[in-house]
Image: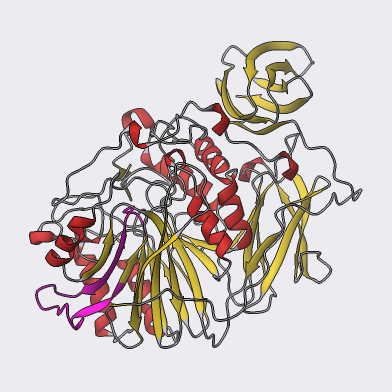
C-alpha cells in the first residue's frame, strides 16, 4: 500500500481499534445479486465522443462456450426509441466481457442502453455523449484509490446520487493487487491472496464489479479511466515494481501484461491503438470547452523510482508521450486543457528535500519539459487532475519556486487539483494544526487535507474553472452523508488559483437516471426465479494441477463439488462444507488427474451447476 511520506509529519500506523467492525463478521460477506442473471456485474460506459461511446457488460453463462446476444441504445428507458442496435459474441478468451463502440449517436445527448443474452436483459445503463461545439458548462467528478477491504465505497454512492455531472474521471487504483489482510470492515474480497496471474486479476475485477456502489455509479455515468500502480503492483514502473519479486512471482513482463489485459477487458476504455493494451494515453474532447488528456505516468515509459531526481535520462511520461501531449495541446481549440493523470505534478519539496520519488518530484527533467511545452507554446488554461496520494490538495504549479509570487500567482504554469481516496489509507486522525505549516513552507499549496476520504468536482465554464472538494464522514459502514469542504477557482487566461466562497451548481436541469432493476424477461415477459447457485468463473482453463472456482450461493447450504471424466465416471469429490450465503473462491487440487476433458458439478441443497474444464 502506498504511504504518504511527509518528513514534517509523524508516520501513523493504522490500528485495529480504529475500525468498529470485526473482519470476521460474516454478515458483511458480499453477495451476487441473483436477480441480475446472467449480467451479475452490471453495465458500464466510457470514453464518450460527440457521436460514439463504449458500452460494457459481462455475461456469466451456466455452461462454458461462446455466448451470443444483442445490445440496444435508446433515448428512453422503455426502449421504444431505439437509435442503434447490434449483436455480440463473447467467450472465455475475453473472460465473457462485452465491449461495443457504439457509433452514429448525437452529440451532448443522454442515452440508455442494455444487453440481452440467454433470455435475459441486463440492467439499463445511462450514458452521455460529448458536445461537438459550444457548451455553457461541463461538470466532472474525479476519484481515485478504491481499496476494497479498507472500507465501503460510499463516495461512489454520493456521486451517483447527486446526478449533476456529465461523466466520472477515474485517475487510477480502481482495484488493488494485495491480499485481503488489510485491517478494515470488509473481508470478502476475492481472491484473498495477492493477484499475480491473469486469472487473479480477472477475479479481482469481478469482485470489485459485484460491489453495489461500483455497479451503481458506472450504471449511471460514463467513466474515463487510466490505471495507476495497483492495477498491476505497488510502485510499478516500466520494467518492474516495488511489490514484485521475479524470483517467486515470475517475470514482470507477464504480470504487467496480465494486469493490462484484464484492465482492457473489464474497463470501458477505447484503446488509442486497437490491440495495443500497453498504450492508454489518449485525448477525449468535449467540444470547445475542454480537451481531456489522459496520461500514463506509470507503466508506459517510467524509469525506476529513486536515484538522482534531476537526471535527464530518467522519465515519468517519456519523450514520446510528451511529444504527443505537446502536439495535441498546441492543436487544441478548447478553452480548458485538462491533464488527467496519476501522481502529483506540483512540487512537494520542503527545505528542497524530495519527499516522494514516485511522483513528478522524482522526475524533474520530465516536469521541466512539460512546463516548457506549456509556456514556450503559450498554452493557457491548463488544469491537472491527480489521484494516487490518498489525500486532497489544491495548488499552483510554479515553474521556479524561488521566483513564484504566492500573493499574485505570477510564475505559475497552471493549477492542480488532487483528490483524496475512495477508501485507501491516509492519516488515521485529523492533522489540521499542521496544514498551516505546510502552506507556509510551500506557499504554492493553497489547500491540503491528509485525513478525510473524498472526491472532487471540476466545474468548467467559458470564463472560470472551479474545483470543489467533498468528503464523507465514514467508510467503516454504509453511510449516506457527505460534506462540502472547500473550493478553488482559476480565471481563464490566468495560471493560478483563488479561493472560492461557495460550491458550484449545475445550471441546467438534471436528467432522470436509469432504473436499478432490469426490464422483464425478454422471452416470456415474466420475471423468472433467480439462480440460487452461480459459478462466475473457473480459472485457469485449461489447467495444469489446480483450478480456482469463484461461486455464489444465495442461501446457506452444504456445498460439494464432483469431477467427472468424459465417460461420465466420477473421478473426484470435494465436500466444501456448510457455507453461509455469499461469494466464495475455492482452490481445487486436481494434479492427480490425467490430461483430458472433465466436467465439474457444483451442487448445494437446491440445485447444481456444471462447468467443462480441460487439463493439459
Q: How many dots with numbers?
A: 0
What's drawn in magenta, residue-wise? 387-415
Q: Quadrant of the image for the C terminus?
A: top right
Residue at the extreme right: 524
Residue in front for this viewpoint, 194 or 89: 194
Residue in front for this viewpoint, 44 or 438: 438
Residue in front for this viewpoint, 111 or 304: 111
Eyeballing the image, is 282 above or below 604? below
Image coordinates of residue 465 in percent, x first then y, are 40, 79
Q: What secondary structure is the magenta-colored segment mainly?
A: loop
Residue at 58%, 41% in the rendered image: 206
Colouring convention used in this rendered image of the protein: secondary structure
Q: Kindly indicate the quadrant of the structure image that contains residue 267.
A: bottom right
Eyeballing the image, is 331 above or below 139? below
Apparent side of residue 482 relative to residue 209 in the rendered image (left or right):
left
Apparent side of residue 40 relative to residue 29 in the rendered image (left or right):
right
Determine if the magenta segment contains residue 222.
no
Image coordinates of residue 510 in percent, x first then y, are 62, 73
Do we see residue 594 in this rendering?
Answer: no
Eyeballing the image, is 385 above or below 314? below
Do we see residue 461 in this rendering?
Answer: yes
Image coordinates of residue 172 in percent, x first then y, are 42, 55
Residue at 84%, 46% in the rendered image: 119
Residue at 33%, 41% in the rendered image: 1
Q: Kindly indicate the quadrant of the structure image that contains residue 546.
A: top right
Image coordinates of residue 484 in percent, x first then y, are 41, 65
Eyeballing the image, is 111 above or below 543? below
Determine if the magenta segment contains residue 412.
yes
Amino acid at each position: 500500500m502506498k504511504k504518504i511520506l511527509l518528513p514534517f509529519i509523524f508516520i501513523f500506523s493504522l490500528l485495529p481499534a480504529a475500525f468498529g467492525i470485526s473482519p470476521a463478521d460474516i454478515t458483511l460477506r458480499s453477495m451476487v445479486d441473483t436477480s441480475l442473471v446472467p449480467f451479475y456485474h452490471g453495465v458500464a460506459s466510457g470514453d464518450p465522443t460527440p457521436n460514439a461511446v463504449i458500452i460494457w457488460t459481462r455475461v456469466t453463462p451456466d455452461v462454458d462456450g461462446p455466448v451470443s446476444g444483442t445490445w440496444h441504445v435508446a433515448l428512453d428507458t422503455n426502449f421504444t426509441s431505439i437509435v442503434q442496435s447490434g449483436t455480440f459474441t463473447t467467450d472465455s478468451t475475453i473472460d465473457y466481457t462485452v465491449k461495443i463502440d457504439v457509433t452514429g449517436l448525437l452529440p451532448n445527448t443522454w442515452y440508455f442502453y442494455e444487453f440481452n443474452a440467454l433470455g435475459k436483459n441486463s440492467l439499463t445503463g445511462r450514458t452521455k455523449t460529448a458536445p461537438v461545439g459550444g457548451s455553457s458548462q461541463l461538470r466532472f467528478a474525479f476519484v481515485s484509490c478504491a481499496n476494497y477491504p479498507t472500507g465501503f465505497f460510499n463516495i461512489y454512492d454520493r456521486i451517483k446520487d447527486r446526478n449533476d455531472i456529465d461523466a466520472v474521471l477515474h485517475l487510477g487504483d480502481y482495484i488493488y493487487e494485495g491480499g485481503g489482510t488489510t485491517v478494515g470492515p470488509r473481508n470478502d474480497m476475492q481472491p484473498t491472496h495477492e493477484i499475480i496471474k491473469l486469472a487473479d486479476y480477472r477475479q479481482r475485477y469481478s469482485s470489485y464489479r459485484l460491489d453495489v456502489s461500483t455497479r451503481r455509479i458506472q450504471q449511471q455515468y460514463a467513466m474515463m479511466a487510466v490505471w495507476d500502480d495497483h492495477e498491476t503492483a505497488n510502485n510499478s514502473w516500466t520494467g518492474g515494481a516495488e511489490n514484485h519479486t521475479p524470483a517467486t512471482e515470475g517475470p514482470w513482463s507477464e504480470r504487467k501484461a496480465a494486469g493490462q489485459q484484464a484492465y482492457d477487458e473489464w474497463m470501458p476504455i477505447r484503446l488509442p491503438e486497437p490491440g495495443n493494451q500497453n498504450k492508454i494515453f489518449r485525448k477525449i474532447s468535449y467540444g470547445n470547452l475542454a480537451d481531456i488528456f489522459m496520461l500514463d505516468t506509470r507503466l508506459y515509459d517510467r524509469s525506476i523510482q529513486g536515484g538522482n531526481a534531476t537526471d535527464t535520462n530518467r522519465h515519468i511520461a517519456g519523450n514520446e508521450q510528451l511529444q504527443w501531449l505537446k502536439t495535441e495541446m498546441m492543436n487544441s481549440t478548447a478553452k480548458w486543457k485538462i491533464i488527467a493523470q496519476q501522481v502529483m505534478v506540483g512540487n512537494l519539496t520542503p527545505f528542497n528535500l524530495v519527499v516522494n520519488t514516485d511522483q513528478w518530484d522524482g522526475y524533474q527533467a520530465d516536469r521541466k519539459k512539460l512546463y516548457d511545452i506549456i509556456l514556450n507554446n503559450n498554452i493557457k488554461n491548463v488544469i491537472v487532475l491527480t489521484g494516487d496520494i490518498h489525500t486532497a490538495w489544491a495548488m499552483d504549479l510554479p515553474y521556479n519556486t524561488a521566483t513564484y509570487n504566492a500573493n499574485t500567482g505570477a510564475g505559475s504554469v497552471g493549477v492542480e487539483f488532487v483528490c483524496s481516496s475512495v477508501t485507501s489509507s491516509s492519516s488515521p486522525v485529523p492533522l489540521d494544526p499542521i496544514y498551516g505549516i505546510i502552506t507556509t513552507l510551500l506557499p504554492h499549496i493553497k489547500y491540503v487535507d491528509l485525513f478525510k476520504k473524498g472526491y472532487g468536482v471540476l466545474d468548467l465554464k467559458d470564463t472560470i474553472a472551479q474545483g470543489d472538494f467533498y468528503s464523507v464522514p465514514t467508510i467503516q459502514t454504509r453511510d449516506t452523508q457527505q460534506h462540502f469542504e472547500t473550493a478553488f477557482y482559476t480565471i481563464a487566461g490566468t495560471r493560478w488559483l483563488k479561493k472560492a466562497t461557495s460550491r458550484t451548481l449545475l445550471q441546467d436541469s438534471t436528467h432522470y437516471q436509469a432504473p436499478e432493476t432490469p426490464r422483464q424477461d425478454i422471452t416470456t415477459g415474466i420475471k423468472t426465479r433467480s439462480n440460487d447457485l452461480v459459478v462466475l468463473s473457473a480459472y485457469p482453463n485449461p489447467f495444469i494441477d489446480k483450478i480456482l472456482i469463484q461461486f455464489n450461493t444465495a442461501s446457506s447450504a452444504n456445498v460439494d463439488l464432483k469431477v467427472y471424466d468424459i465417460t461420465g465416471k466420477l473421478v473426484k469429490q470435494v465436500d466444501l462444507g456448510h457455507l453461509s450465503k455469499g461469494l466464495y473462491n475455492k482452490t481445487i487440487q486436481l494434479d492427480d488427474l490425467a490430461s483430458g476433458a472433465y466436467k465439474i458439478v457444483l451442487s448445494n441443497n437446491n440445485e447444481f451447476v456444471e462447468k467443462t474444464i480441460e487439463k493439459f
